[in-house]
Structure formats: structure tokens, C-alpha cells
Amino acid sequence: MDLFDVARSCFRRWYVLLPLLAITAWYSYSTYSSVQPVYYANTIIGLAPPSVRQDSPTAGGEIRRNGLLDVGGASLVANLTALGLREPAVVDRVAAAGGSPDYTAKAFPTPPPNPQLPMVFVEQTSADPAEVTKTLELVAAQAEVTLRTLQQQARVPEDQMVTPFVVTPPGTPVAAMPTRTRSTLAILAAGTGLSIVVTVLVDVLLTRLRSARQKPVRPSTSANRRDGESAYTADAGRGRESSDDGAVDAR
């Protein structure tokens, strides 16, 4: 079966194809209309190095330095801060204050080969724009607590600690429809293909049923043989009777 056969089947069984296409169009429209917009916003948190740097030891022989900066620099502190903002305890505090636990925190993305910037990128997507703004504000507030706890665990002196500050505050959430068009087209394509397949199957089934009903019934060979034998026997009997009659007249 080629495309022309499929087209002929769809044309013959239009009363099957059109309702299926109507159902597909209705379902696709319902899917397109039911998708709600989502809102997106982000904020950027910067990291400020300590205002005082001590390179020479004090009278007691102690050098007051930030070991995290010495080991990995500001990029290490940014990555550790982003990980800390995703800790369950921090997420629970954000959610308890009225925010969403679905935010994303990561080191500020920098294309290679540029060096990583000492900033943390926080983003949030939600169906409620007010929730997006509140979540980003709460996460920015938690950044100071998280960074301070991290440095205290690393035994960084108070005057050598890195402090966070907001580089870009949360902006107005932007509405977007991320998957509405793609999902609608997928449903429309799948429904159309399924409708054509069902129509072709119905056409093949009805065509075979009609051919079976219109096919003439042929008598069997044994019946034909019996009918022939009966006719031959009857003719032979009449021949014998005629012969007997002739014999009687001769006498």
C-alpha cells in the first residue's frame, strides 16, 4: 500500500477520518489553553574580599589570613557558597519563610577561557510572580548566613572573612510559555497519524467484508457429478425403453 492507496482510503472513509481529526483538534486546543504561564527572575550575589590583608606574622607568630582564599581563591568561595545555599537546612528556612524550595543556586556562569567571577547566580521559576520575588530575596538573605557559617567551619578569622553583597537585585519576573507550542504540535501530529491509520484499517476491513458478501457460491464437484450421473441414467433408461418398444412392434 502506497500513499495513493492511503489517500483513496481516507477519501472513501471520510466519515471516519473527519470525526477523528475533530477530536484531535479539540484535544490539542485544550492542551494549548490549559498550559499556564510561568515566571522567571534571577539575582546575582557578589563576594567581597576582606578589607585588611595580613602578609606578615603578628607578635605571637600568627598570620591572620583567609585559608579558603589562599587555597582556591574567590572562585572556590563562590562554588562553596552556591553549594551551601542548596543545603537542606537552608532550603527549609527559605520554605518556612514563605519562599519556594525549587530555586537554583550556582556559581556565576562564565564562558571559557575567561576566569570565573566571584559571584553566585540564583534563579527561580514559578507560576506565581510574587513567590519568585520573595524566594530570591530570602535566598539572598541566607547567603550571608551560609557564607559566614562556611568560613567559621574553616576557622577563618573574623576580620579576614569574605562578605556577600547583592550585585543585581531580583527584577520583575518575566512570563513565559516554555512547553505549550511543542506539546501541542506533538499531540496534533500523533493524533493525525493515528486517525489516518484507523481510517485505513476500517477501509480495508469494510472492503473485505463487502467482497465476501458479493462472492457467488459455486456448487461442489461431487454435486455436479451426481447430477450428471442422474441425467445420464435417465437418458439410458429412456433408450432402453425405446428399444423394448421397437422389439415388441417387430414381433
Image (spheres, rainbow, N blue to C red):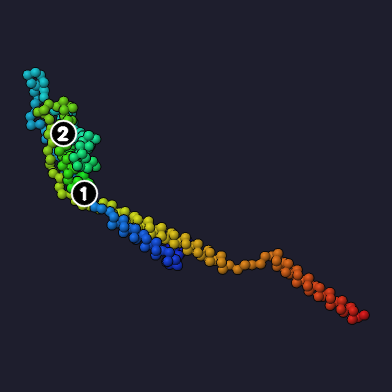
Which sits earlier in the primary sequence, circle 1 or circle 2?
Answer: 1
In the rendered image, which residue does mark 2 sit on? 145
Q: Tell me: 18 left or right of 233.
A: left
Question: What residue sits 7% from the left and 19% below the top?
Answer: 59
Q: Determine crowd level at label 1: few under 14, some 14-19, many 20+ residues with C-alpha closer than 10 A.
A: some
* Comparing labels 1 and 2, the label whose residue is closer to the camera: 1
Residue 200's place in the image compared with 248, above or below, is: above
Which quadrant of the figure contains the C terminus? bottom right
The residue furthest bottom is 249
Q: Element at badge 1?
A: loop
Q: Is residue 39 visible?
A: yes
Residue 148's place in the image compared with 105, above or below, is: above
Q: Element at badge 2?
A: helix
Question: What residue sits 53% from the left and 63% below the top?
Answer: 208
In the rendered image, which residue does mark 1 sit on? 128
- Image coordinates of residue 205 in percent, x first then y, are 50, 62
Question: What residue sits 13% from the left and 36% below the top?
Answer: 164
- Image coordinates of residue 76 in percent, x first then y, are 19, 33
The amino acid at mark 2 is Val
Q: How many marks?
A: 2
Viewer-side residue, 236 vs 57: 236
The amino acid at mark 1 is Asp
Q: Tell me: 173 left or right of 23.
A: left
